[in-house]
């Protein structure tokens, strides 16, 4: 029997979402083949072993004084568990499933540690994780692919914290937004998830406040044209390098003005539609584009690719390399519709870890 380490929590703004996701994944792990080891990462970056899922549900796992460390030693392929009395023991880490969202988990950092340790892991690799987590980098990486697919992405202006601090450059950016993008616009941290730090801006007066809000989350910011359209999502899976399966297309019906963190996880009026009424050619085009985008960022294992449909054109929004696995998450629901229940999906994802491209 192999040990599978499930990493959850993390230091990102999506910490709580990860804690929900890991419970779904844990229930689906085949206990006849794998022995799960739960490692929670607090917002302060403390790695804590967890045996009781009730402590994840009530959050009390964060108070545990024990610690854990995943070793970068490729010869050992192990983690060390430290007890409160100072004693420690090693456990083999045969496979790691990083059920982590956002910075420090979905951005290539944890993946880099696992590459050093030469431990098979679920999900995209270092490069694809880093590119896909950063919205500006994603736009640059997929630009040519989208042109060939006849799918566009929203027009945008990128800025850094150092640029914004300069009064002259700040004034230029505000003018460019008005002239090139027009209001309303969306202001987003380049490197964040679950719509954290995102604002819809209606006019020039509130633009600086929205940029400052985004800069609290990341040092780079994306100002993007507003796309009025339906929010569509496509799940992709790759268990063998170069072979990609795309799900059917689902639709998000946000209860709020846009699908931000609260609308996703706290508003019961937000809905997911697994059978949206779409022209057949639109669904087919989205599936094809999703697979091409996934390959363009060197994706492997899993991702969810998000689009808008205006009624006339398809617009690429973003790619998420470790999408949510909560009870309301689109990724597992779309593949369940395709005939893979959650146990089968998790089994395929774990198996993909050992087929990683070298």
Image (spheres, rainbow, N blue to C red):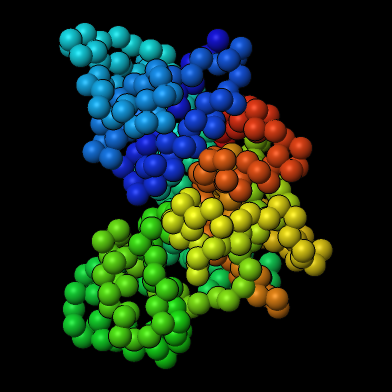
Give coordinates of residue 107: x percent, y percent. 40, 47
Quarter of the image that includes the N terminus: top right
Residue drawn at 49 percent across, 30 percent down = 23
* Closest to the observer, 140 or 43: 43
Q: Tell me where residue 55 appears, x and y as whole percent.
A: 37, 25
Relative height, residue 310 to residue 10 (above, below): below
Quarter holding residue 136: bottom left
- Name the residue located 45 percent from the left edge and 27 percent from the top edge: 6
Q: Is residue 130 above or below residue 358?
A: below
Q: Can you tell which quarter of the image residue 165 is in?
A: bottom left
For this view, does 27 lie left or right of residue 165? Answer: right
Image quarter for residue 145? bottom right
Above or below for 37 versus 107: above
- Residue at left 37%, top 36%? 9
Evaluate whether residue 243 shows in this view.
Answer: no
Using the image as rendered, state which of residue 114 and residue 251 is in the foreground. 251
The picture places residue 84, in percent across and down from the top left corner, at 20, 14
Measured as percent of width and height from the top left, residue 293 is found at 60, 57
Q: Residue at x 32, y 26 (%)?
A: 61
């Amino acid at each position: 029997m192999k040990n599978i380490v499930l990493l959850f929590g993390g230091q990102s703004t999506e910490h709580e979402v990860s804690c929900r996701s890991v419970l779904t994944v844990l229930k689906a792990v085949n206990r006849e083949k794998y022995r799960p080891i739960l490692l929670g990462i607090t917002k302060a970056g403390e790695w804590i072993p967890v045996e009781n899922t009730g402590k994840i549900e009530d959050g009390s796992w964060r108070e545990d004084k024990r610690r854990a460390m995943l070793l970068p030693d490729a010869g050992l392929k192990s983690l060390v568990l430290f007890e409160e009395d100072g004693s420690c023991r090693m456990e083999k880490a045969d496979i790691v499933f990083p059920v982590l969202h956002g910075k420090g988990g979905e951005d290539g950092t944890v993946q880099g540690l696992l590459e050093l340790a030469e431990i098979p892991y679920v999900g995209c690799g270092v490069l694809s994780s880093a590119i896909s987590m950063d919205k500006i980098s994603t736009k640059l990486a997929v630009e040519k692919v989208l042109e060939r697919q006849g799918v566009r992405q929203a027009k945008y202006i990128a800025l850094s914290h150092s640029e914004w601090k300069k009064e002259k450059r700040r004034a230029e950016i505000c003018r460019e937004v008005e002239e090139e993008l027009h209001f309303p616009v969306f202001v987003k941290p380049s490197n964040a998830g679950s719509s954290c730090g995102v604002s819809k801006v209606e006019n020039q007066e509130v633009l600086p406040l929205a940029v400052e809000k985004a800069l609290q989350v990341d040092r780079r910011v994306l100002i993007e044209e507003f796309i009025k359209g339906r929010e569509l999502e496509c799940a992709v899976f790759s268990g063998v390098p170069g072979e990609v399966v795309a799900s059917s297309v689902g639709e998000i019906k946000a209860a709020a003005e846009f699908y931000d963190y609260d609308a996703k996880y706290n508003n019961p009026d937000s809905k997911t539609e697994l059978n949206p009424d779409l022209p057949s050619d639109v669904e087919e085009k989205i599936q094809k584009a999703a697979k091409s985008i996934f390959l363009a960022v060197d994706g492997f294992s899993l991702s969810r690719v998000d689009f808008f449909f205006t009624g006339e054109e398809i617009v690429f929004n973003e790619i998420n390399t470790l999408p949510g696995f909560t009870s309301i998450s689109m990724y597992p629901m779309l593949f369940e519709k395709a005939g893979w229940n959650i146990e089968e999906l998790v089994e395929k994802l774990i198996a993909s870890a050992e087929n990683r491209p070298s």
